[in-house]
Amino acid sequence: MSPTKNIETLSARERRWVERARSAQSRAYAPYSQYAVGCLLVDTGGKLHTGCNVENASYSAVICAERVAATKMVTRGAREIAVVVLITLSDEPVFPCGVCLQVLLEFGARCQIIAVNRDASRYRAASLAELYPNGFARQHLA
Ligand code: THU
């Protein structure tokens, strides 16, 4: 599995993406879990799309930060994710949940994921294909 690395080993551009994800995290609506998550998607045209988690009193209605960002991206006319930057409140970087991996597969089968820990001091990177090999995708419906 991918090693945890110091944030300073990211490029300046990647660190700016981390700051955008962090700013989205600050808008999380997470009164039930208190676990704020922020996400930045970079589409293959280089455009940026942010999301935060949005919870609900009916707990199962939660929308994760990644899915908020992905639906915003599609609404703006983009269809292909190149990079996902995810920041959570965990002390160590954590990768997206299974539901979000499925949604990322729909729009970014070849995307790279950068998971960042709560104080943005450390990260881990992996491809979606590493995290979710053999996922169910549109070709299986053919
Ligand atoms: N959450 C995300 O936003 N993304 C993930 O990949 C994992 C979990 C949110 C959902 C919920 O609001 C909170 O984190 C705790 O599960």
Image (cartoon, rainbow, N blue to C red):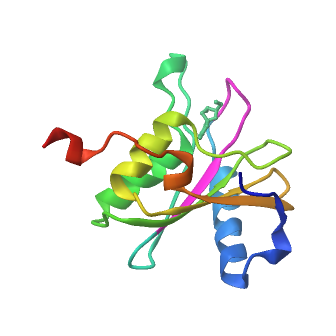
Residue 137 or 133: which is nearer the viewer?
133
Q: Quadrant of ligand 1?
A: top right
Q: Which residues are magenta?
A: 30-42
Q: Quadrant of the C terminus?
A: top left
Direction from residue 55 to residue 77 in the image, left or right = left
The residue lying furthest to the top in this view is 58
Relative to 83, say whether 33 is above or below: above
The residue lying furthest to the bottom in this view is 12
Instruction: Give the residue at x 31% y 67%.
Output: 78
Instruction: Give the residue at x 83% y 47%.
Output: 92
Instruction: Give the residue at x 71% y 45%.
Output: 94
On the image, the x and y values in percent for residue 70 come to 42, 53
Chief secondary structure of the magenta portion: loop
Instruction: Give the residue at x 51% y 54%.
Output: 128
On the image, the x and y values in percent for residue 34 come to 74, 31
Residue 136 or 86: which is nearer the viewer?
136
Relative to 2, say whether 59 is above or below: above
Direction from residue 79 to residue 91 in the image, left or right = right
Q: Is residue 8 magenta?
A: no
Relative to 117, say whether 101 is above or below: above
On the image, the x and y values in percent for residue 108 come to 40, 59
Q: Is residue 35 magenta?
A: yes
The residue lying furthest to the left in this view is 142
Count how many numbered circles sit on residues in the image: 0
Residue 133 or 36: which is nearer the viewer?
133
On the image, the x and y values in percent for residue 140 come to 22, 41
